[in-house]
Image (cartoon, grey):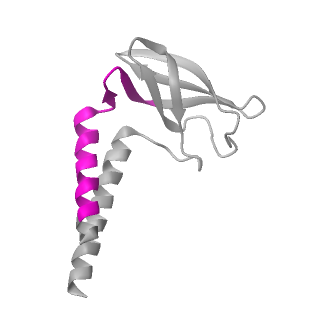
Amino acid sequence: MIYFFIGIISFILGLYYRKKKGDFGNRVVVDGEITKVCETEHCVYVKYVYDNETFAAMCSNVDADLSKLHIGTKIFVVIDKATPNCPLIARYNVKGKDMTIEGSEKAAYIFAMMCFIAGFWSLVH
C-alpha cells in the first residue's frame, strides 16, 4: 500500500513540474550549461537563457567536487526574476550527468510507474 502512496506523490510531483516549468514566485529555475570549470578556484562558469535573453555568470562552491564536470553539462540555475543576471544557485549532478527540468519531470513519472508496479507486485505476492 505504501508503494501506491509514494507513486501518487511522485506522479503529482511530475504534474507540478509540468505546470510550473520552473517558475516559483519571484524565483525561477532555468536550464543552464557549463561553459568553463575552474577546479583551482572551485567555480563553474554557466550560460543560461531567461526571457529570450542569454546570461553568463560565475558560480562558486568551495566544498564542491568539480572533477567529474565538463563543458557542455546541463545544469539547473536558480535566479531571482528581478536580477536574472546574478544566479542564486547553480545545481549540477556530482557525477557529471545532465540535469534539466524536462528530465526531472520524466524521472518523477518513471519513479511513479515503478512504485505502482511494485505496489501491484506486492498485492499479488
Using the image as rendered, state which of residue 85 and residue 27 is in the foreground.
27
Image-quadrant location for residue 109 = bottom left
Residue 119: percent from the left, percent from the top?
25, 73
Residue 16: percent from the left, percent from the top?
25, 41
Write down the region rendered in magenta. 5-31
Residue 114: percent from the left, percent from the top?
30, 66
Using the image as rendered, state which of residue 47 and residue 19 is in the foreground.
19
Image-quadrant location for residue 1 = bottom left
Is residue 28 covered in magenta?
yes
Using the image as rendered, state which of residue 33 and residue 66 is in the foreground.
66
Q: Is residue 8 left or right of residue 57?
A: left
- Residue at the (57%, 19%) spot, across then down: 57
For this orientation, the residue located farthest to the right is 40
For this orientation, the residue located farthest to the bottom is 125
Q: In this rendering, is residue 56 above or below 97?
A: above
Q: In this rendering, is residue 51 above or below 108?
A: above
Residue 35: percent from the left, percent from the top?
59, 28
